[in-house]
Amino acid sequence: SSSESAPTAPQIFAIANQKGGVGKTTTAINLATALAAVGEKVLLIDLDPQGNASTGLGISRSERSPGSYEFLLGLNPLDASVRATQIPGLDVMPAAGQLAGAEIELIDLERREHRLAESLAAPGNDARHRWTIVLIDCPPSLGLVTLNALVAVDAVLVPLQAEFLALEGIGALGNTIERVKKRLNPRLHIFGVVLTMVDRRMTLSQQVVADVRAHYGELVFGTTIPRNVRIAEAPSHGMPVLIYDNACAGSQAYILLASEFIRRRRIAAEQAIVA
Ligand code: ADP
Ligand code: MG
């Protein structure tokens, strides 16, 4: 609107798809790592009670509390809920098993869909001033915890596994995003769709890539993530694949995804100035 107002690129992202095993957590960990490697200050919020993102970043079970459960419910300030990782520029808010209870506990709370948004914006927490990018790894459901993420973020990144029926059920996520946008968070939009576990030698995988591009068009990232055994091995070593084996095809893909991500944010900011 005016030259004095700062450009507004989306800054807080949910990584969401109610289907499990599609690469949400893998994308959260490795995109976060690749973004930190190029100088962004990144916070990864683990909002899945399974805590896979916390495991993948080497946070032991005894170090996960207080974490996202307490923060979501407004029981703890940001500082007490966040840990530094071994990666410079990357912090994590870990998830403990207790988070599973939040789905029920939230039901009776006032402003139950707004809890995470309000915690992130609370005086003294001020997440937008402390990190340049915040990624939220969502659980595989469209329940109240995911709803809290969708209300708190600017945009959604949707990982889709390149397999038969990849688009099955994704309509429910689209409908939820539309509903949240209308009623709870007008700035919400899909930032992009990332195809994961793409097998270049398989015709089926290639067909799915084509179908998803036909369906989502420009929303689909040009970068696809290949199926790569090093990606699957890395979490058991408590490190992102980018640290475990930075030369493998999976790492290279996440580095490319991060640069495409940054390019898209820059374009979004430029469009916001023009608008
Ligand atoms: P989600 O968070 O959506 O449930 P994950 O990221 O945990 O999915 O991935 C599910 C499983 O697939 C994990 O065991 C993970 O290591 C593996 N995986 C994810 N992406 C890839 C990939 N590109 N190549 C090989 N294995 C992958
Ligand atoms: Mg996960």
Image: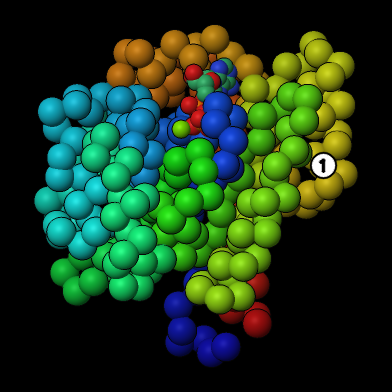
Which colour style is shown?
rainbow
Q: Please report the residue visible at 47 percent of the width from the left and 58 percent of the height from the top.
A: 147
Q: Nearer the viewer, residue 114 or 42?
A: 114
Residue 235 position (above or below residue 81): above
- Which residue is disc 1 drawn over? 213
Q: Nearer the viewer, residue 51 or 126?
A: 51
Q: Please report the residue visible at 30 percent of the width from the left and 25 percent of the height from the top.
A: 55
- The quadrant of the picture occupied by the N terminus is bottom right
- The quadrant of the picture occupied by the C terminus is bottom right
Q: Determine the image quadrant of residue 174.
A: bottom right
Q: Nearer the viewer, residue 50 or 257?
A: 50
Q: Please report the residue visible at 33 percent of the width from the left and 32 percent of the height from the top.
A: 51
> Which amino acid does the dot numbered 1 rest on?
Arg
Q: Please report the residue visible at 30 percent of the width from the left and 19 percent of the height from the top.
A: 238
Q: Determine the image quadrant of residue 17.
A: top right
Q: Position of residue 154 (x, y in %)?
A: 50, 64
Q: Position of residue 33 (x, y in %)?
A: 40, 35
Residue 272 position (above or below residue 138): below
- Around disc 1, counting alpha carbons within 10 Å, would you say few (fewer than 14), some (14 to 19), or many (20 or more)? some
Residue 190 position (above or below residue 101): below
Asked if residue 11 lies left or right of residue 160, the reply is left
Q: Position of residue 134 (x, y in %)?
A: 39, 53
Q: Is residue 88 visible?
A: no
Q: Position of residue 244 (x, y in %)?
A: 38, 15
Asked if residue 166 lies left or right of residue 81, the reply is right
User: Helix, strand or loop at disc 1?
Assistant: helix
